[in-house]
Image (cartoon, rainbow, N blue to C red):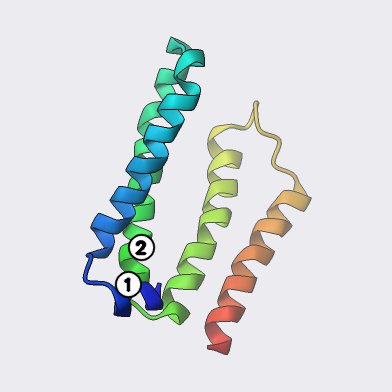
Amino acid sequence: MRWLATSTSAPPAVTASAALLGGLLLLVVVVRPRLSRRMLPFVPAGIAFGLSYVALFEAFYRGRVSIVSPLVATESLVGVGLSALLLRRTELVGRRLAIGAVLIVAGGALIGAAR
C-alpha cells in the first residue's frame, strides 16, 4: 500500500472500487449462468464486504500499518463472535475455532507492536 500511495496519484477509494468492480464483472461472467434467486439474499452482504475493502484500502493509505493491522485482525474475532451469537444452530463454534480467532488477533497485535 505504501508503494501504491507514493507512486500514483490515484485516490485509494477509486483504486479499491475499480479493483472490486473488476472482480464483480468477472464473477458476473463466470457465475451468471448458474445464478439463481436463492443467491439474492447474499447480495447485501457482498456489497458490505466490498465497502469494507474500500475502507481498508483507505485506512492503509492514510494510517500507520502498526495501527491498522491489529484492527483488521479483529475481523476474525468479530466473525466468530457473530457466528456464535447469531448462527448457533447452523454454525458450530467450538473452542478450537475461538482459540484460532484469538490467535489471529494476537498475531496482528504482535505485528503492530513489533513495528
Q: Residues within 10 Å of mark 2 (few under 14, many from 20)?
A: many
Q: Give coordinates of residue 70: x percent, y percent.
A: 51, 71
Disc 1 packing (10 Å; few <14; some 14–19; many ≥20): many
Q: Give above or below for 65 relative to 21.
A: below
Q: Image quadrant of residue 3?
A: bottom left
Under mark 2, the amino acid is: Phe
Res 45 visible: no
Q: Position of residue 22 (x, y in %)?
A: 36, 42
Q: Residue at x 46, y 67 (%)?
A: 71
User: Is there CB contact under 8 Å for labels 1 and 2?
Assistant: yes
Quadrant of the frame with the N terminus = bottom left
For the image shown, how many numbered marks are present on the structure? 2
Circle 1 sits on which residue?
A: 61
Q: Is residue 42 left or right of residue 57?
A: right
Q: Is residue 104 above or below residue 97?
A: below
- Residue 41 left/right relative to 98: left
Residue type pointed to by label 1: Tyr
Residue closest to the eye, 75 or 1:
1
Q: Which residue is mark 2?
A: 57
